[in-house]
Image (spheres, rainbow, N blue to C red):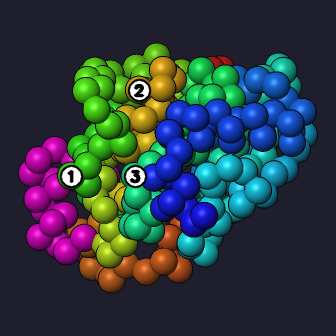
């Protein structure tokens, strides 16, 4: 079966349960406490969280597929923090623009919940609308605008999204780094970047950050009962804000330059969660 068929024929919660069972066996960790999704620029940022106790190839886990993008990592790792928390790190994010359907997009998040994770850290690389945010600036997500015209939820699932991005965890992050700014994240479908006119539209409706992930995942995470923490790495100024055209190389470079700061930040935030 290909991915589309798998997701059409298996109930998403059941597929997440199967994936979680596989992860428990493969890692030897029966329950994970936290999950972490690594986005563009964050690939190396999990290095200071703790000791890697197991690495699993995403393609071996039910419902997971190899990532489509250079700079995205295709593995799941289990990390034990110094204070004994088990963190499931999802290096394999499926993006909406891959065309595998929204069930595939949030399968990692549902799997995280099924492994026992009570909270999830969603990271991403994105475009910034605030000129003060030079490439490499981490920004807390305070809220989102879902511009994908879809939802990961099916049926009469009326989930409250007030305070979707945990005020408690944002406060924890600001204890770690009081200089962190917050912003509203707008998820576009991609894979193209925005036109300058679309960036201006995003600005007028209240967005500070533009990206291609996270909002759908955050919704699924909340529906699955997890506390959500979102943090963006501004890897480029959004189109038209920046005088130069966007490139994927710039995105990867900004992530590498910000590496030490965001690694420390993630480790310190996770230690306090
Ligand atoms: I990295 O400027 C990254 N991802 N939509 N716009 C959108 N997604 C992004 C951008 C950006 N940069």
Q: Is residue 140 above or below residue 178?
A: below
Residue at position x 71%, y 56% from top?
Answer: 58
Residue ID for mark 3: 102
Can residue 250 be seen in this snapshot? yes
Question: Which region of the structure is painted magenta?
Answer: 194-210
Is residue 253 visible to the viewer in this orientation of the structure?
no
Q: Secondary structure at mark 3?
A: helix
Mark positioned earlier in the residue sequence (2 or 3) = 3
Q: Residues within 10 Å of mark 3 (few under 14, many from 20)?
A: many
Q: Is the residue marked 1 within 8 Å of ligand 1, measured from its CB?
A: no
Tell which of 191 and 273 is nearer to you.
Answer: 191
Rendered position, 191 above or below 208:
below
Looking at the image, which residue is at 59% across and 29% down? 113
Looking at mark 2, is its residue's CB closer than 8 Å to ligand 1? Answer: no
What residue is at 32 percent from the left and 75 percent from the top? Answer: 192
Q: Left or right? Give the position of 236 relative to 151.
A: right
Q: Which residue is mark 2?
A: 223
Q: How many marks?
A: 3
Residue at image position (42%, 22%) is 166
Q: SS of the residue at dot 1?
A: loop
Give me the disc on residue 211: none
Left/right of residue 201 with respect to residue 262 in the rendered view: left
Residue 247, picture quadrant:
bottom left
Magenta segment includes 258: no
Q: Which label belongs to residue 149?
A: 1
């Amino acid at each position: 079966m290909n991915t589309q068929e798998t997701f059409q024929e298996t109930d998403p919660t059941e597929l997440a349960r199967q994936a979680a069972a596989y992860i428990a066996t493969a890692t030897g960790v029966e329950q994970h406490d936290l999950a972490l999704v690594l986005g563009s620029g964050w690939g190396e940022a999990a290095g200071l969280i703790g000791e890697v106790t197991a690495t699993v190839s995403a393609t071996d886990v039910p419902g997971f597929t190899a990532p489509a993008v250079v700079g995205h990592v295709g593995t799941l790792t289990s990390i034990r923090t110094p204070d004994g928390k088990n963190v499931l790190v999802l290096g394999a994010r499926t993006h909406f623009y891959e065309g595998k359907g929204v069930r595939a997009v949030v399968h990692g998040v549902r799997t995280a919940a099924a492994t026992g994770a009570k909270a999830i850290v969603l990271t991403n690389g994105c475009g910034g609308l605030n000129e003060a945010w030079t490439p490499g600036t981490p920004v807390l997500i305070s809220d989102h605008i879902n511009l994908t015209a879809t939802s990961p939820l099916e049926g009469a699932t009326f989930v409250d999204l007030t305070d979707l991005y945990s005020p408690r965890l944002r406060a924890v992050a600001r204890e770690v780094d009081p200089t962190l700014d917050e912003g509203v994240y707008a998820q576009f479908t991609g894979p193209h970047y925005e036109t300058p006119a679309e960036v201006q539209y995003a600005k007028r409706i209240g967005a500070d950050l533009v990206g291609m992930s996270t909002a759908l995942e955050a919704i699924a995470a909340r529906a699955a009962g997890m506390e959500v923490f979102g943090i963006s790495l501004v890897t480029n100024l959004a189109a038209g804000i920046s005088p130069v055209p966007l490139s994927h190389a710039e995105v990867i470079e900004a992530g590498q330059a910000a590496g030490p700061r965001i690694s420390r930040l993630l480790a310190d935030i996770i230690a306090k969660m």
